[in-house]
Image: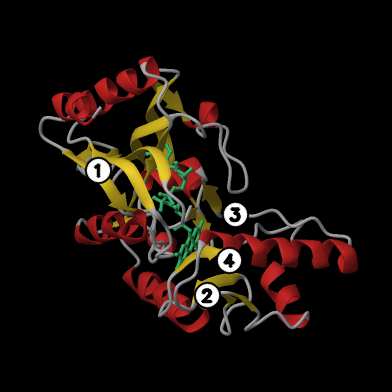
Amino acid sequence: MLFALKKIIKNGKVNRNECMAKHTSFKIGGKAKYFVEPASVEELLDLLDYLKIKKKKHFILGNGTNIVFTSNRYNGVVVSLCRLNQIRKYDGYIQVFAGVSLNRLCYFFKELNLGGVEDAFGVPGSVGGAVVINAGAYNFEMKNVVLGVLAIVDGKVRYLTKEECGFGYRNSRLKGSVVISVDINYTDGCNEIRMTEVMNMRKQNQPLDLPSAGSVFKRCDGLIVSKMLDEMGYKGTSVGGAMVSEKHAGFIVNSGGATSSDVKSLILGIKDRVKREKDIELETEIEFVD
Ligand SMILES: Cc1cc2nc3c(=O)[nH]c(=O)nc-3n(C[C@H](O)[C@H](O)[C@H](O)COP(=O)(O)OP(=O)(O)OC[C@H]3O[C@@H](n4cnc5c(N)ncnc54)[C@H](O)[C@@H]3O)c2cc1C
């Protein structure tokens, strides 16, 4: 299999037994059998064709900031899109490839004095990962700026209009497809003061000094879950190395040596108690990859 992968991925990278903890913001994850970084859309398409024919389990990785990767061995192929990282400005829109980080996109907007993505500054994901879950912060959601998405849907490259993407709260119809690039709208004039403001709010409210995958639970009928968990006394509660942040009860942090099972147990405990005491079914925003 290694030989076959290397034949397909001529310019990108193929590794065996890659430690996934170093590719996730949670710093959790055992070894993946294969780790591949296609260097072009052609390599990506050939790779996906091959994996489909061979019926090989695989996972598309963005920046790894919304996932808990299994601490056991991942017996499949992790496909990182980090090398699909071009940004191009056209008349009226920006085409940004999936592997570009939202922060780099924000700096690109700032450099060209364009507006529209200021509130996304500080969200650590890639554009691909952000569009799939319609990431959002403050007054921003990806859907506000997306004009259309180039994606691989059922093995074929398709251009999806914003409407076809079916954006909802931390959700879209793009799940299960592979985003190649996103066309993004812009306005004239970048609000640099706003960028600084949102970054300061993040620094003030979020435990950025410890590894995490951001907010663990989705908002629930307008309820601020972190506030409720704080009132229930969850800050500092831990299972193994996974701990509810002392700073923000909506975050679970890796306080040292956390495993995916620690995070799972902590979340299950919280969900059970919230269901029992508040009759609320919490839904997780972060994703487990097993
Ligand atoms: C400190 C911190 C703060 C955060 N703040 C916010 C916030 O304010 N708002 C917010 O919404 N999120 C926030 N997050 C979560 C996270 O950054 C976002 O959800 C982000 O959009 C995830 O992107 P990613 O590239 O890291 O995706 P990954 O974690 O790599 O993957 C997430 C999912 O997207 C899929 N995926 C990734 N790329 C593609 C692609 N190109 N095509 C198809 N599927 C793909 C993966 O298969 C997986 O299912 C935060 C996380 C951290 C650690």
- Find the distance from the CA under tag 2 to the CA under tag 1: 27 Å
- Find the distance from the CA under tag 1 to the CA under tag 3: 29 Å
Q: In the rendered structure, are the residues bearing label 1 and label 3 in contact, judged by CB atoms less than 8 Å apart? A: no
In the rendered image, the vertical position of residue 138 relative to residue 197, given as above or below: above
Left or right of residue 135: residue 189: left
Residue labelled with disc 4: 262
Q: In the rendered structure, are the residues bearing label 4 and label 2 in contact, judged by CB atoms less than 8 Å apart? A: yes
Local secondary structure at mark 4: helix
Position of the N terminus by quadrant: top left
**First in residue order: circle 4 vs circle 3:** 4
Residue labelled with disc 3: 285
In the rendered image, the vertical position of residue 25 relative to residue 93, given as above or below: below
Disc 3 residue type? Glu
Tell us which disc is closer to us: 3 or 2.
2
Tell us which disc is closer to us: 4 or 3.
4
Disc 2 residue type? Gly
Residue labelled with disc 2: 241
Image point 45% across, 18% down: which residue?
154
* Image coordinates for residue 132, horizontal then vertical, percent: 48, 41
Image point 55% across, 50% down: which residue?
287
Q: In the rendered structure, are the residues bearing label 3 and label 2 in contact, judged by CB atoms less than 8 Å apart? A: no
Residue labelled with disc 1: 16
Image point 56% across, 55% down: which residue?
286
* Image coordinates for residue 250, horizontal then vertical, percent: 62, 70
The yes-or-no answer for disc 3 within 8 Å of ligand 1 is yes
In the rendered image, the vertical position of residue 151 relative to residue 248, given as above or below: above
* Image coordinates for residue 66, horizontal then vertical, percent: 48, 55
In the rendered image, the vertical position of residue 159 relative to residue 171, given as above or below: above
Is disc 2 surrounded by few (<14), some (14 to 19) or many (20+) residues within 10 Å? some
